[in-house]
Image (spheres, rainbow, N blue to C red):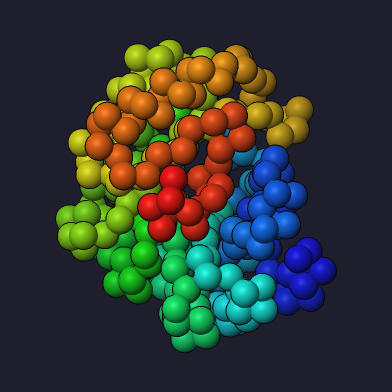
Amino acid sequence: MSPLLGELGVATICQSARCPNIGQCWESGHATFLILGQHCTRNCRFCAVEPGRPLPPDAQEPERVARAAQALGLRHVVLTSVTRDDLADGGAGHFADVIGALRNMIPGAGIEILVPDFRGDGPAIATVLHANPDIFGHNVETVPRLYPSVRPSADYGRSLRVLKAAKEIKPGQKTKSGLMVGLGETCSEVAGVLRDLRGGGVDMVTIGQYLRPTPQQLPVQEYVKPELFVRYARLAEEMGFIGVQCGPLVRSSYRAHEMAAGKL
């Protein structure tokens, strides 16, 4: 998969974020495309994606991503991006263009997007929703108490509003969010995040162990025991989430196709 993606000039978050599941996912034909460059305008303390000044959006990228997805035979495509606070719409129009290119080239494929917060801008959120993704995802990443140390440029309340806005703008839209554990949160705080997400109508949730990607990121505070992941999964199911994945190596797009199809 890697040589083909390189030939087409297409990036994946699998590589940029040093995902621990890259081997398993690529062997099974799954990848999450990273659009809008490989430099982020924010500097979250958990993420291996490089901060910096990104280049202007590449007008040819939508076609390249669609060609890559077609060549790989993907039936469920996941798109994510760096945060682009330098763009007026946060990159929403580019997301819509990539979705449109995918719809044209592989019309039967499911499309899942994992978007930044677009600074909470309603028109930007509407732009990507009007392109008709099957699943609209935005991660809260951690509990609100830890935002200053983990996501200093983000805002927990704003992230919740983004997810809620997706439902308000497009009733019936499936939404998804995820968070990491092992950063110093408590069980009650995780339960509180799940309640907040469900209260905002979020349909699907993922919970995974934070793993320090390089020495430059935050250290792991705790390796959560498997039985606690089981407890979190049961709690989420009891709250009414229709899709739940909890486990040490679970990430936002891990087994995304199965979750979207209701097989998890």
Name the residue furthest bottom: 104
What residue lies at 44% left-to-right and 61% top-to-bottom? Answer: 112
Q: Position of residue 49 (x, y in %)?
A: 66, 46
Using residue 97 as the reference point, say whether residue 46 is left or right of it.
right
Above or below: residue 60 compared with residue 174: below
What residue lies at 43% left-to-right and 13% top-to-bottom? Answer: 186
Q: Position of residue 167 (x, y in %)?
A: 22, 54
What residue lies at 38% left-to-right and 52% top-to-bottom? Answer: 262
Above or below: residue 51 compared with residue 179: below
Q: Where is residue 248 in the image (x, y as percent from the top left)?
A: 59, 29
Q: Which of the two residues, 136 or 38, is positioned nearer the viewer here?
A: 136
Give the quadrant of residue 45. top right
Give the quadrant of residue 108. bottom left
Q: Which of the two residues, 79 or 94, is positioned nearer the viewer here?
A: 79
Above or below: residue 48 compared with residue 26: above
Where the C terminus falls, by quadrant? top left
Where the N terminus falls, by quadrant? bottom right
Q: Where is residue 89 in the image (x, y as percent from the top left)?
A: 39, 64
Using residue 20 as the reference point, say whether residue 177 is left or right of it.
left
Query: Do we see residue 47 in this rendering?
Result: yes
Give the quadrant of residue 214. top right
Above or below: residue 59 compared with residue 138: below
Name the residue furthest front: 263
Name the residue furthest right: 3
